[in-house]
Image (cartoon, grey):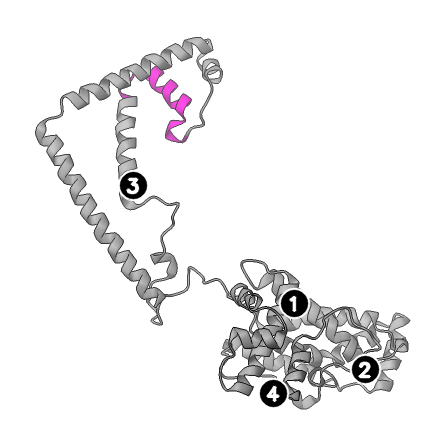
Amino acid sequence: MPAKSKSLRTFASSDDSAPSETTATLETAVIDTPPSFLEKAEPAPSEPIAHGERSNLQLYLQEIAKTPLLTIEEEIALAKRIRRGDKAARDHMISANLRLVVKIAMDYKDFGLPLLELISEGKIGLVKAVERFDPRKGGKLSTYAAWWIKQSIKRALANQSKTIRLPVHLVDKISKMRRTAMILTEQLGREPTDEELAIELQIPTSKVAHLKSVSVRPASLDAPVGDESDSATFGEIVGDENALSPFEGLHEKNLNSDLSAMVNSLDAREAEIIKLRFGLEGREELTLEEVGKRFRVTRERIRQLEYLALNKMRKAMSRNEAIRTVDEIEQERRQRDRMAVIREFVESRNGGTTKAGSN
């Protein structure tokens, strides 16, 4: 690979371990961010942001631009005051380095959290860095703070950006893979293959495929299937495997109705015992002893009454089956056939809608 690719690999696989304040430099993009950066901090047109969020971002950038960047001498002087507990010096150093937070947050704006939230999380990391910074060890605050800002943002992404939480180390690897893919796309004039990404990242191709799969955001069931405002949502066309179909629900309703009629045909005490023992009508199932206490009789007596009531219900079912006419049996058969045809039609329509939505 040419020298340019070598520098790409170094950048893509850079270590995010704990920072050393003697580190010579960090990437030029995040050190000594000039005020002119604020003119470029707005998201590209290809990445639409809500109007309200854009306005808030513009106001925030204008506000942080009011605080000038610090010279090395000013940075050292403020750090000494901070070590003596000077809150005003701490606040000044934080304000002067908020451009760095915005710059780093821009690198993570496509990971599932709004840019302003990323900036807010990055500011938490900046505060930690300012409080821990010791210029006597060498290095600049921007070098030291970049690590803390990145860690704070990546932790927020891992905890908040996805329905399924990703470990922080995976967020970091996904970030490196995307940066590498963007640079390769510019070099090659097309999207890189998994093999090309694997070579640059020095990881197996299977690992690249895994990172791509875990980085996919889950689709919301409330999201529309098409582009039209009145399009059906995924929740309306994706069936719940654990839910009863309309036909199963109707069948269960009919069974409950027949069962309720048979129970109510018993005398009041027997009906109440059956309801309590089997938890009918939304009641809690009770033991023989618990039902016995309610009726102030022994558990054995409740068992006998339950046996008699169930026998009455069995005989009633037998009588109902015996008096069914040939016409009733034929009518039930035709009804089952019609339901089978309707079920087949509905399932075919649902399948076609699902395919259309996936396309």
Q: Secondary structure at mark 1?
A: helix
Name the residue that disc number 4 marks.
40
Secondary structure mostly seen in the magenta stretch: helix
Residue type, mark 3 in image: Glu
Which numbered disc, 2 or 3, marks the residue closer to the eye? 2
Split into 4 quadrants, where in the image is the C terminus? bottom left
Q: Residue at x 45, y 61 (%)?
A: 220
The crowding category of the residue bearing disc 3, from other C-alpha atoms within 10 Å (few below 14, some 14 to 19, many at least 20), is few
Q: Which numbered disc covers residue 24?
A: 2
Mark 1 is surrounded, within 10 Å at the Cα level, by few (under 14), some (14 to 19) or many (20 or more) other residues, namely many
Q: Nearer the viewer, residue 107 or 263?
A: 107
Q: Dot 4: within a 10 Å radius of its alpha carbon, few (fewer than 14), some, or many (20 or more) residues?
A: few
N-terminal of the pair, mark 4 or mark 3, is 4
The residues bearing labels 2 and 1 have C-alpha atoms spaced at a distance of: 24 Å
Instruction: Give the mark, 2 or 3, whose residue is nearer the N terminus.
Output: 2
User: Which numbered disc, 1 or 4, marks the residue that appears first in the sequence?
Assistant: 4
Amino acid type at circle 2 is Ala
Could you tell me residue 219's position as x and y percent? 45, 63
Task: Kindly identify which residue carries mark 1.
Answer: 154
The answer to whether mark 4 and mark 2 are in CB contact below 8 A is no
Q: Is residue 56 magenta?
A: no
